[in-house]
Amino acid sequence: MIERAITASLPAKWVTADEAYGQDSKFRTWLQQHRVGYVLAVPRNQRLPTTAGNSRPDVLAANAPALAWKRRSCGTGPKGPRLYN
């Protein structure tokens, strides 16, 4: 579906997906090759390539400097503001 959208020149610059797609290295490679930005969920024990070698996402997040995080709102939900880092 994403390939068809990109081929049809739809004005999409990025995609987001759950762990099922986040674990698919061929999918990530395809997105990179087609210069499509992405945010994909991955399990915490999945190894991810970095400039310093492979690492787990939970380790990367724990070691990120405070300035790397920004709090964002996803709007108001039934229990109040939905804020995420």
Image (cartoon, grey):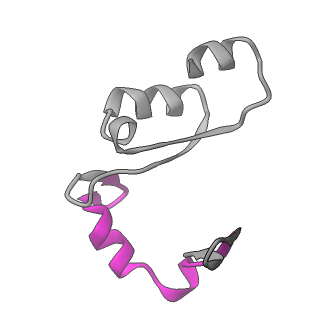
Residue at screen point 58% across, 26% down:
34
Tell me, yes or no, if residue 32 can be seen here.
Answer: yes
Whole-percent x, y for residue 35 in the image: 61, 32
Outermost bottom residue: 66
The residue sitting at 32% across, 33% down in the picture is 24
Looking at the figure, which quarter contains the C terminus?
Answer: bottom right
**Residue 39 as seen in the image, left or right of residue 18:** right
Residue 7 appears in which quarter of the rendering? top right
In this view, the residue in front, 81 or 44, is 81
Q: Position of residue 64 (x, y in %)?
A: 42, 78
The correct choice, above or below, for 16 with respect to 57 in the image is: above
Residue 51: percent from left, percent from top? 37, 57
- Is residue 71 in view? no
- Which stretch is magenta? 49-74
Q: Is residue 21 magenta?
A: no
Work out which residue is located at the far left of the displayed protein and give it.
45
Q: Is residue 54 magenta?
A: yes
Front in this rendered view, residue 44 or 54: 44
User: Residue 21, image x and y in percent?
Assistant: 38, 35
